[in-house]
Amino acid sequence: MKNALSRLLGETTMLNEPVAPARRGVVAVITDGDRLLIIRRSRHVVAPRAICFPGGGIESGESESQALTREIDEELGAAIVPIRCLWRSTTAWNVELSWWLARLVPPIDLKPNPAEVESLDWLTPSELLLVPELLASNREFLAAVLDGRVQLSAV
């Protein structure tokens, strides 16, 4: 049955074999007291106008921290210091995400790139969970923060 279904779907691997993530990405978790920096994506990117943490794809040859630094510069015109990886997850679209605690480097003057970011805001985890446009992968991360599986302290 599996082989017939595989042929029907044009697949060359067994259906029960794990699928490697198609892409890898990084997410910046930047705090200001109990608030977190979030963005509304522009109309011109994947998941247009969704609310999420800033970040993006890891390019070939980049480390996670290098990708995170580049993405925040591209999206918000800001410099950051990656502190540590907080969480790892895989989205419904098979994107492997690494969630990094990061600190903005002064002087802090966030300038959203309109090609990628429509707006930004600072919200608490509880406030963020009330936002209907919040991406599902962000909800999973926030649940882990609120139940104590993820600590947002720098130590």
Image (tube, rainbow, N blue to C red):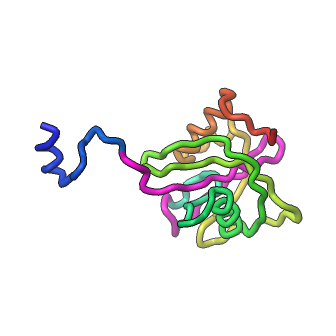
Q: Residue at x 82, y 66 (%)?
A: 109
Would you say residue 39 sits in the magenta stretch?
yes
Between 117 and 133, which is closer to the camera in this rendering? Answer: 117
The answer to whether 63 appears left or right of 47 in the picture is: right
Between 18 and 124, which is closer to the camera in this rendering? Answer: 18
Q: Residue at x 67, y 66 (%)?
A: 70
Q: Residue at x 68, y 57 (%)?
A: 65
- Reply above or below: 13 against 144: below
- Reply above or below: 43 against 39: below
Q: In which image quadrant can residue 113 be found?
A: bottom right
Highlighted magenta segment, given as a residue range? 19-47
In the rendering, at what x and y percent does residue 147 appear? 66, 27
Q: Residue at x 31, y 41 (%)?
A: 17
Is residue 130 visible to us here? no
Is residue 132 visible to us here? yes
In the rendering, at what x and y percent does residue 98 appear? 60, 48
In the rendering, at what x and y percent does residue 122 appear? 75, 50
